[in-house]
Image: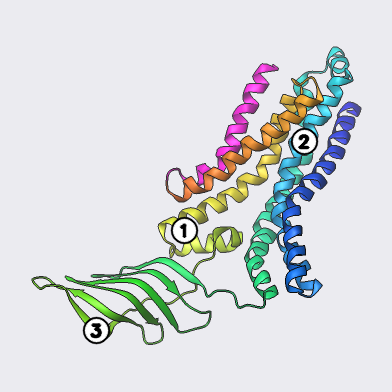
Amino acid sequence: MILIRAVLGEVMRWYLTGVVLFMSLLMTNALSTTVDKLLTYHPPFGKALTAFLLILPDSLNKTLVMAVPFAILLTFSRMQSDNELKAIFASGVRPLSLVWPLTLPFALVGVLAYFNAGTFVPAGLANWDRAWFNIYDQAPPPPRQEKYTYAPPGALYYAGRVVNNEGSQVAQLKGVMVQRGDETITASFGTWDSQQKTWTLMDAWIIQPGKNPFQQLGKLVVPQNDTLRSPPLEAKQVSNAALRAALDNNTLGRKLRRDYTFQLAARVADPVTPVIFALAAGLLGLLIRNRAAAFAAVLVFIVCFYVLWSTMPGLAGAGAIDPVLAAWVPNLAFLLLTGVLAWRLR
């Protein structure tokens, strides 16, 4: 028990060092951007500080994960170089007995990461751009929705882009197509009046069975009974509760539904990563004999995980892999590594 406490104490000291180190590295770019804007636009210091702090929760969650292999591998490499591990194993302690206790503190780290990912991270990312537009003294661009589709019985309404100012009853339409029965109407531009429940198309082309396509110059008004809503936010900017509500309402397009599903699953999978990293790094640390190899292992750990972690959202959004499975793939890969290392040290 005393031995485990000593190991955990050293691991946590290195972990705090790693958190400070990686947080400093991640925030360097945000800090330099903030300083540049301070010198260029001369905003009040409070505005610049607010913009800088909004990105902090997202960087914190990444740091909480990256510091795990850093702390464990350096602790075990130090114990290897001082022959402490040999003495411990010679006294009858099984190698795996040193690894399992490492999961306890990092399970608490995972709980912190879970609550941070579901509340502070999306709120910070949602307000990040708004804060910078405030510094630039410009209005944020109006909300827009790409590839809008509405399909009531016997009809189809499509717009390549819907742009509307918040609170406005009228939205701008681009790339419009309306199918009503056998009639197809297309137009480059139009407007959507949500109060009158109409689409007004400009210089529309009309295709009807048995007739040549013809253009109706000026305005063409067609009824449209859907509700004009604010475009959905990017999945990373939405809280857990809002993600669940949007998925339950079944109003999202296929791409956005996959993105929301992945993001919700990732906010459960990512906080489990510190525990899996603790197991994998602990087992790997027992095999590493020097600090140079430990530093190299930290880099390999982080790079391999980052490649998987950054690739999965795109694959999930494209429908190439189930969104829930994609969120867990990085953890499953390192869990497999953990199994191989445990078998090696059995």
Of pointers 1 and 2, the one earlier in the residue sequence: 2
Give the residues drawn in magenta, as a range.
320-346
Judge the density around disc 1: few (<14), some (14-19), many (≥20) Cα neighbours within 10 Å: some
> Residue 102: horizontal and vertical position, in percent?
78, 33
Residue that label 1 marks: 256
> Residue 141: horizontal and vertical position, in percent?
55, 74
- Give me the C-alpha separation between circle 3 and circle 2: 67 Å
277, above or below 265, in the image: above
Question: In the picture, residue 32 is in which quadrant?
Answer: bottom right
Question: In the picture, residue 291 is in which quadrant?
Answer: top right
Residue that label 3 marks: 217
Quarter of the image where the N terminus is located: top right
- Give me the C-alpha separation between circle 1 and circle 2: 36 Å
Judge the density around disc 3: few (<14), some (14-19), many (≥20) Cα neighbours within 10 Å: few
Label 1: state its secondary structure. helix
Asked if residue 155 lies left or right of residue 66, the reply is left
Of pointers 1 and 3, the one earlier in the residue sequence: 3
Residue at x 79% of width, y 75% of height: 44
Asked if residue 179 lies left or right of residue 137, the reply is left
Residue 70 is tagged as 2
Residue at x 41% of width, y 82% of height: 194
> Residue 233: horizontal and vertical position, in percent?
54, 65
